[in-house]
Structures are given as C-alpha cells and as structure tokens.
Image (spheres, helix red, strand yellow):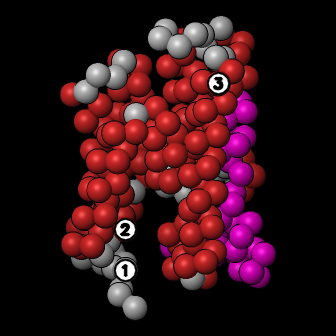
Amino acid sequence: MIVPLLITAVVAYLLGALPFGYWVAKAKGVNIMEVGSKNPGATNVKRVLGSGPGNLVFALDVLKGVVATMVPLVSQAGGEPGTIGYDLGGVVGVVGAVLGHSYSCFIGFRGGKGVATAAGGLFILMPVPCLIAAVAWVVTFYASRYVSLASIVAAVVVTVLPWFMSFSVVVATMASLLGVLVIFRHKANISRLMAGTEHRWNRK
C-alpha cells in the first residue's frame, strides 16, 4: 500500500502544481505574478483579465482537485472501498494537489490559495459539507463583497462540519488540515481585513 500511495502523492502534487492561472494570463501577454495581488489564482486572474479567463482558471483548478482525488479512489491505490486505506488514497490525492497548487515547483514554489483545488477534491470525498461551505461562501461574499472573507468562512465550515457527520477520522482530519492551510494562506488578507484595506469586489 505504501508504494502506490507514494506514487499517488507525487502525481497529485505535480497535477496540482500545474499553474493554469499563470499560463492563461501569459497567453494574454500578462505576467500574473506581477500585477494585482500577484497571485496566480482564479480571483486575481478574473480581477486583472476579466470573467472569461478567470472562470476558466477556476474550472481548471477545481478539475485538478477532482482528478487528483478520483484517480486513487478508482484505482484503489490505498485499498478496497470501506477500508481506511481507501479513504487514505483519496486524502493523499487531494492534499497532494492542494500543496502542489499552493507551492508549485513550476513557478518557484509559489501559487494560489488552494481554495478551488481543495473544493474539487473535497467535493469527491464529502459532497454535503462542501455544498454547505459553498452556500456559506456565496452568502458571505454577497453580504460583504470580500472574496477572501468568503473563502475563509467556507474553510472554517469545511474544518469543523465533518466532525459532526459520519465521515472517517482520516477524512475529517484531512478536511481540518486543508481548511487550516487555506486559512493560513489568507494570512495577508486577514491582516488587510482587520486594517480595512482589503480589496472589495465592486458590482459592475
């Protein structure tokens, strides 16, 4: 079981590390690492280049999480369904993809916040908590117009909710760790929110 999981971790990391935000912006003649928030995530791409490129990057980042999580489950890299190893295969996939997205070896170990990639993988493992987190994101965003605050609230929901539902300790622990990672990746946004200088998404 160890070797398949190690292979899963490496493949998931490399898949997650694919810097779609950087590539899409580069195709438009923009170095996304030097404009806006200097983040290669979908939000900054959308802010700088518009809805089309931004939505494309978001979809591709979500897809990374979905594929990285589904492949080890379908191939039963960690074991048969109903076993801890089976859950562990999916967990290794989504964690690897999020780490790859956040610390991409293709762009100097920089990357996005990991929200979209984590959402894609977590939806495969625990769809109901993810749907609740998505509702929390939408409500928070439209109430505040802060993407960062909405993402932080959704991460808190994902961190806490699985412990009150019928998920294995492996999946619940992984969700909590990913939620904490996403919140940590927003530390600069949290500072700006507290200072009142965070970028608010304006209605157009």
- Residue 185 or residue 101, whichever sits in front: 101
Q: Would you say residue 99 is visible in this rendering?
A: no
Q: Where is residue 94 in the image (x, y as percent from the top left)?
A: 55, 35
Q: Find numbered disc 2 in the image and state the secondary structure of the residue it sits on.
A: helix
Q: Residue at x 34, y 22 (%)?
A: 167
- Residue 170 or residue 195, whichever sits in front: 170
Circle 2/circle 1 CB separation < 8 Å? yes
| Crowd around label 2: few <14 · some 14–19 · many ≥20 (10 Å) | some
Instruction: Check the image and report above or below for 75 versus 134.
Output: above
Tell which residue pokes out farthest to the bottom in this image. Answer: 204
Q: Where is residue 175 in the image (x, y as percent from the top left)?
A: 39, 33
- The amino acid type, in three-letter code, at marker 3 is Val
- The residue at which mark 1 appears reads as 201
Res 188 → quadrant: bottom left
Left or right of residue 184: residue 13: right
- For the C terminus, the quadrant is bottom left
Q: Which residue is drawn at 52% across and 27% down?
A: 91
- Residue 123 or residue 11, whichever sits in front: 123
How many callouts does the rendering have?
A: 3
CA distance separating discs 2 and 3: 33 Å
- The amino acid type, in three-letter code, at marker 2 is Val
- The amino acid type, in three-letter code, at marker 1 is Trp
Q: Which marked residue is nearer to the observer: mark 2 or mark 3?
A: 3
- The residue at which mark 3 appears reads as 74
- For the N terminus, the quadrant is top right
Q: Give the range drawn in magenta.
A: 9-38
Disc assigned to residue 147: 2
